[in-house]
Amino acid sequence: MRRDEIERFLPAVYQLALHPFAVADEPETPDAPRTIGPDPLLGALLDTMEMLHAPVEDVLANLDRYIDPERAPARFVPFLAGWLDLDWLLVASPDEPSPAAPLLATGLDRLRALVTRAADLTRREATPAGLVDFLETATGVEGFAIHEDVIGQDEQPKPFHLRVLAPVAARPFAPLVERIVLNQKPAFTTWELDFGAAG
C-alpha cells in the first residue's frame, strides 16, 4: 500500500498535518509563520508503513508463483508438500513429528516434481504402476519394477508379497526408497527390496 493510499485512511486532522496549510487568523511573525509545513514525524511514519507493506503486497500480487511448485521459492516447496500430505518424505523417521531436513534426500527438483504430480500419484496409490511412478519421480532414476508373483524358498508362492526391484543407481537413496514402499504399498502386503535386479 503506497503512502498516499494509507493517508486516505487517516482521520482528517492527520491528513491536514501532512500538507502545508496557512493560518488565516494569526499575523505572521518570525516565530509564528502564517504557513505551517507538513509534520515530518507523521510523514516518516507513513514512509515506514509503506515500506513494511511492500513485501506482503509483492506476495499477494504474485500469489500464483507461490502455489505453482515449479516457480515457488525453495523455502516454500516443503510447505506445499505438507499441504499435499507429502511431508512424511521430509522427516528423518516416520515417528518424528516435524521435518528434520528442509528438502527431500534427492533434492529440491525431485520434491518439486512430486508436488506437481501429487494428484496423479495419489489417485494411483497402492497399485504397482503407481508405486513405480512414485519411486521414479522421487528418485529421478528410471527402471524400478514390482513383482507380485514371488516364489519363496520353499518353491511356493508367497501370498500378498511384493518384490521391489530397484536399479543400482537408486542405491544411494535406499532409505527414501524403503520409506516410499512402506507408505505407498497396499497395507496388507509384505515386501522385499532388491537393488540391481531391475532393468
Image (cartoon, rainbow, N blue to C red):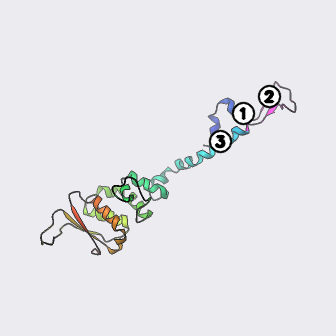
Left or right: 99 as drawn, with respect to 46: left
Measuring from the top left, give residue 180's x and y in whole percent: 31, 61
Which residue is under mark 3? 3
Magenta segment: does it hold 99?
A: no
Q: Give how far apart the Cα atoms at labels 3 and 1 are.
A: 14 Å
Image coordinates for residue 195, horizontal then vertical, percent: 29, 73
Name the residue at 42% across, 58% down: 100
**Residue at the location (29% across, 62% down)?**
181
Is 164 placed left or right of 44 in the picture?
A: left
Query: Which amino acid type corresponds to the residue marked 1 in the rendered image?
Result: Ala
Instruction: State which tag comes first along the sequence, 2 or 1.
Output: 1
The residue lying at 45 percent from left, 59 percent from top is: 70
Task: Quote the CA–CA distance across marks 3 and 2.
Answer: 26 Å
Helix, strand or loop at mark 2: loop
User: Which residue is label 1 attached to?
Assistant: 17
Q: Nearer the viewer, residue 172 or 30?
A: 172
Q: Tag 1: Cα neighbours inside 10 Å, few (<14), some, or many (≥20)? A: some
Mark 3 / mark 1, whichever is N-terminal: 3
The residue stretch that appears in magenta: 16-39
Q: Quadrant of residue 199?
A: bottom left
Left or right of 156 in this view: 182: right
Q: Does residue 192 appear to the left or right of 46 in the view shown? A: left
Residue 162: x %, y % from top left:
22, 65
Query: Mark 2: which amino acid?
Result: Val
Indicate the position of residue 146 as horizontal and vertical percent values.
Answer: 25, 67
Residue 23 is tagged as: 2
